[in-house]
Image (tube, rainbow, N blue to C red):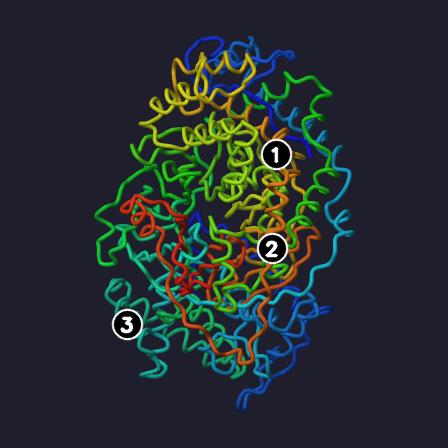
Amino acid sequence: MTISTLTRGGAQREQQHCLRKMERVIIAMQDPDIGLKMRNQRLLITVIPHAMTGNDIMEWLIQKYNITDEEAGHLGGLLVQYGYIYPLKEPRSLILRSDDSPYRFQTPYFWTSSRWPASELDYAIYLAKKNIRKQGELVDYEKQNYNLLHKRINHTWDFVVMQAREQIRASKQRRKADRIVLECQEQAYWLVNKPCPGAFDVFDLGPERCNVLNSRVILNSSLLFFLLRISSVPNNSLSSHFLLSLSCVCSFMKFCDQYHQHDPIMSGCLPSNPWISDDTTHWTINTDLVGTPTRLRVERWSFSFMELLNDCLGRREFMTYLEKEFSGENLCFWEACEDLRHGESSKIILKVEEVYKTFLSPGAARWVNIDSKTMERTLEGIKQPHRFVMDDAQMHIYFLMKKDSYPRYLKSDLYKNMLSKAIVPQETKKSVFPFMRRQRHSSPSPAMVSQATEDNGKAKGAGPAATNSGTLS
Amino acid sequence: MCDQTFVAITFGPCDSCSENRPLMNLYIKTEPINYCSLCMEIMACQDLAGGETLNSLKAETESLRKRLEEERKKLHDVELEKVAEKAEALSALNLKTRRTLKGHANKVLCMDWCKDKRRMVSSSQVPAHPVFNSSQEHAVSMPTTWVMACAYAPSGCAIACGGLDNKCSVYPLSLDQNENLAAKKKSVALHTNYLSGCTFTNSDMQILTCSGDGTSALWDVESGQLLQSFHGHSADVLTLDLAPSETGNTFVSGGSDKKANIWDLRSGQNIQSFDTHESDVNCVKYYPSGDAFASASDDATCRLFDLRADREVSIYSKDSIIFGATSVDFSLSGRLLFAGYNDYTINVWDVLKGTRVAVLFGHENRVSSLKFSPDGTAFCSASWDNTLRIWA
């Protein structure tokens, strides 16, 4: 055997990781104590030693990893696909059958990780051997490869043919069982490394990733970063930076608990999950500016201030409440700042001026109440306006609303009415004929809807599913 | 839970050179100082007294790093799993493929949902690039082979995508199915290596991208101007995710250097860094509350990192899982973590208890991307077997 090991390409680290892990599994499987029990298999009239059945493999995997049949089958199938186990009957079909079909372990010499990439010379020798042994044994794609190689490495063709002949002669002198085993091993190796076009290719990886870039630059800046950050902070305040694990952990549990009912995967959704039942009622009753929201939605507004603001219906309700309290300008200011932060760069100066005129200048129409220090800083910043010039003021107003107006809103009649009016849709009973499916239609594209509202000049509760006739496609 | 916010001046006049620049907030002997990065480097180099070499500084950094680790360990007083024993057990999930979308002729590399909860955009290896609504609506031809990143604009009127062409381009979506969308394309971002991820920030006007050249960047869509760039990874940046927090100013990125970094959008600074993974970090996703994030890596594990405790709090792995995880997403409540792997399966993990809840089979090749719909009713997985599957 003249298979040579060429140097590996740099980007196949990920592949190597998996291959090493698979190899560990294989080695464990072959362990004399905890591994598979192998026996002799009869293949036609020859007896092949050290073989096992597909069933054995699956059972071993199930027992070792405590997994289900399906997963064991899947994992075993991958081991076969990557060439670590090969089938004796039907060698071209690289799948794991969970019956008594015989399989063998591939010899480490032929492992995917040690003989990669496969050399062209070796492939040529292999194909030549097959050709010489029996005319017409080469399959279509192999014939094509053979001809291609013949053209490409024509200068060494004599060597190729000579090697092929030598190897055939050497193999004839072996025992039949050994010969069959070696042939099977070699064939399995080439089936994995030069697969039939269209079949799974082990070496089909994504684009290359380089590993280490200009590390010197990074080292310098990260050094400085570390030094300055750590050495200038007094000893005991290091710990105060990081919250205790317990409180963090409890906060996760609290969050999961709170949102449990709202998670469609965990608790289902009412009336039914549109993807399962093809009934889009769930979406129509939850559109952005629907008349009567669902109870779950209104409840969610009480979880956090952010939830209220993120929901346009919630925000509108909150605005109504604030107007009643004569503090609506706070929310307007916050929205204007958000628009500034996330809007077009070209309109920044314009927007800053407008915000100043409307909210900050003395005697402004909708003057917002910010503390003097922040106001001073903001006014200074406005002289050279940029995207984040309103950040301090915005944060101040945000926390004002959050600590003051928001809790009062939740206790207000407005919110309580909303909650009591809110609908709780009935869960759809499963239909008698589960295979009868509703007709699916496309919903209107948001692009279309926004153009329509532009044309009409009206914005009557426009959302992506404004027309109620839109059902799921 | 306390409000983890503090006002830090991150952009403005530098204390030493008085120019308007992104600032780094430092404390020298408990005094806050705001220097721009240039002045900070100058100051640090001045401290390099005679006899101090880079090596000695490196040694000092190492000892400081060790001290930091020790301090961190002191705070590790309880495991997530122990506390989560009190949480109620999950009932069996009944997740099945509800739709299979077969419009691509080649590997599907990435997908994203539209805010209308029904549409999605997906990108693939060959130049055709459909926009789906369970029936293919548009297809955009791209002049590049691997389109590895795609994103839907919040308004639903545009998509952004890019890949081996090193660019991120924005395509406005129109109603006319026959119209050639490629003609209206607008090149927004330009990197020096492949584009691995992109996402719109809260509006259609800004895009955040990450690239194989080791940087992430924030761009203005209208003018194509670079607003901020983020340097700190020492290898390809493979993934990013925006924080859902109230102040909405940070994002997390993961790269081939096995690290996951948290960045401040305004100043461009690297605020926190996590490097416990043993291989490339393929995907990062914030926990719904914004206090933690999960990452998927080629070392076949997914991990949960807490931002306030500044450490990894949970590992999701199993002996029988050998292949790398390519993508993760949380269910709406954050109780379940869904991860797609290179062994064609999707594993569902209980975030709190750390155990595996289910394994989903169905794809016939690697799962390249996995995302939940905005309302959490279903999730979509994209795979190299040329299909997308919607599970619920």
Residue pointed to by mark 2: A263
Task: Give the side of residue A214 with respect to residue A256, left or right.
Answer: left
Residue pointed to by mark 1: A406
Residue type, numbered disc 1: Tyr
Q: Mark 1 lies on which chain?
A: A
Report the front residue among B97 and A391.
A391
Q: Mark 2 lies on which chain?
A: A
Residue B211: horizontal and vertical position, in percent?
A: 40, 40
Residue at 29% of width from left, 32% of height from top? B223
Secondary element at image label 2: loop
Residue B146: horizontal and vertical position, in percent?
A: 34, 52
Query: 10 Å neighbourhood of mark 2: few (<14), some, or many (≥20)?
Result: many
For the residues marked 2 and 1, what is the alpha-carbon distance in whole angstroms?
24 Å
For the residues marked 3 and 1, what is the alpha-carbon distance in whole angstroms?
74 Å
Above or below: residue A106 compared with residue B318 = below
Above or below: residue B20 compared with residue A104 = above
Residue A425 appearing in the image = yes
Position of the C terminus of chain A, as image quadrant, is bottom left
Query: Mark 3 against mark 1, which lies toward the viewer?
Result: 1
For the residues bearing labels 2 and 1, Cβ distance under 8 angstroms: no
Secondary element at image label 3: helix
User: Which image quadrant for residue B103?
Assistant: bottom left
Secondary element at image label 1: helix
Q: Which residue lies furthest to the bottom in this view?
A: A45
Q: Which circle marks residue A144 in the picture?
A: 3
Numbered label tally: 3
Residue type, numbered disc 3: Gln
